[in-house]
Image (cartoon, rainbow, N blue to C red):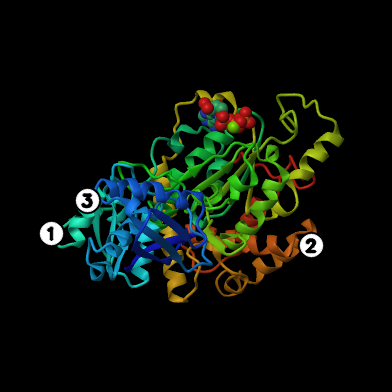
Amino acid sequence: MLATAHTTALVGLDARLVRVEVACTRGPGWFEMVGLADSAVRESRVRVSAALGQLGILMAEHRITVNLAPADLRKSGTAFDLAIAVATLAALGKVPSAALEGVVLLGELSLTGAVRPVRGVLAHVSGASALGFRRAVVPRDNGREAGLARGIETRLADGIAAVQQHLAGDRMLDLAEPTSFAGMAVGGFDLADVRGQYGARRALEIAAAGAHNLLLVGAPGGGKTMLARRLPTLLPPLDFDEALTVTKIHSIAGLLPADRGLVEHRPFRSPHHTISDAGLVGGGEPVRPGEISLAHHGVLFLDEVLEFRRSALEALRQPLEDGQIVIARVRSRATLPARPIVVAAANPCPCGYAGDPLHRCGCSEERVRAYRSRLSGPLLDRIDLHVSLPPVDVASLASRAFGESSALVRQRVTQARAIQRARHEAREVAARVNAELSAKDIEAIARPDAAGLRLIGSAVERLGLSARAYGKILRVARTLADLEGATAVGTTHVAEAVQARIFDRHLQPTHAVSSSTP
Ligand SMILES: Nc1ncnc2c1ncn2[C@@H]1O[C@H](COP(=O)(O)OP(=O)(O)OP(=O)(O)O)[C@@H](O)[C@H]1O
Ligand SMILES: [Mg+2]
């Protein structure tokens, strides 16, 4: 007999329909699988045979052929087990074939027939819903994650026996409860802990308000890591849609907190500089999200950015531009979202003390130049805000005067983001925040007044800025206006945006800008 069950395969975050066709005849034991399956899928033969054995089905008595269609879609992982087992049950007449219609089945099987959790359940189930399926069966341990999907009735399975009974109409599997979501602001650190560093604090606020990338340059121990860690605390909580996307990405990577089944906080990712290119931007077969995708809607911190492999930094260029990463494979192209705020930190020179009034820099001019040249160019061009941290003076470290708290700054950031959202919705602009505005949108939304235009014109000429830098300055100027609640972008906004762009005294000695003034 022939039977068909349905499941899905992921290409990036997208779910593709996979039909599992099983043909069964009596005869000496035989089990063959076709349809571009990787080794984990091919091994499902062993798991499925053992699991069905628990139901008293002796595979040695049947000739079974499994076809995974479409044949040109690569199938990987263990999540096909349940669909293969159920289609086999139907082909053997142990469950009615009609019961498999309109249901997607997901889950790994153990040798005892238990249904084990799998990765990417939310992407699978919400993708199945988008494909028109109204019912799904998933592992019970993925229940919280599956409960985030809308528009599909999801049931939870512990074992193959219960799934058989459910499909035979003998006993219903439990429904997945809708998972409640309450986005939470990131805690644990507070901006109030940072003494002095007004310029850097201001830059963090601007970065948070418009989702602008940020470079922090300063001597060792100057507070770069401390500041970067506090950027997530300035961001408003994830909204539900953002949380769904972040949850899908983390689930595919196997990083979902098991107890919650969803990501509720904006991610902060801080990969070590020895990370591989694929680790940073994603890759592999099946495709694994890289750090830039894991940090989507959150913060990607590249500490000691100059220590990263050049190829890894190069690999960041395309996703930083597009907000997504495209990973091409022989038979498919996976697209993953990749829109974090990038914070890069570097010392001003190899020894770290160039420009520091309190320490002598021991680096030769040539070494400093070589070091800085690694930072300049395309990557730097993609960073909107450049901040040089002066050494913290001892008086401010010892002072009891606290700076503003994260919660206070977050209020202004949230306000500025609400302004952006309302404006973009009114003008039907796809961008959510200013950093995402396209060149065309900038003309309409961030065009400064006449004096502002003159100012940016002269800055471009004086500093030899690229066209990309020009656009970035206007985006930052727009954010500065939004933080003030100003409708139009004025000269002061452009002036501050130009300053924030200049790689100050450490890296462009001719254009000194101090970030230490309040
Ligand atoms: N502005 C500041 N206010 C309060 N504490 C600070 C400040 N700057 C630095 N510190 C203290 O110094 C420590 C070291 O700072 P941090 O690790 O952020 O420096 P860094 O710039 O990242 O240094 P490195 O270049 O060595 O990585 C912090 O843990 C904090 O205790
Ligand atoms: Mg550090």
Q: Give ligand 2's quarter of the image.
A: top right
* Image quadrant containing the C terminus: top right
Q: Amino acid at mark 1?
A: Asp
Between residues 431 and 101, which one lies in front from this camera angle?
101
Q: Residue at x 33, y 52 (%)?
A: 59
Between residues 417 and 93, which one lies in front from this camera angle?
93
Q: Position of residue 344 (x, y in %)?
A: 62, 43
Q: CA distance from mark 3 to mark 2?
A: 74 Å
Q: Amino acid at mark 3?
A: Ala
Image side of residue 102 versus residue 428, left or right = left
* Image quadrant containing the N terminus: bottom left
Q: Categorize mark 1 by other alpha carbons within 10 Å: few (<14), some (14-19), many (20+).
A: few
Label disc, if present, on residue 461 of the rendered structure: 2
Q: CA distance from mark 1 to mark 3?
A: 11 Å
Decide which of tag 1 and tag 3 comes sooner along the chain. 3
Image side of residue 24 versus residue 267, left or right = left
Total marks in image: 3
Which residue corresponds to mark 3?
161
Q: Position of residue 430 (x, y in %)?
A: 49, 71
Which residue corresponds to mark 1?
170
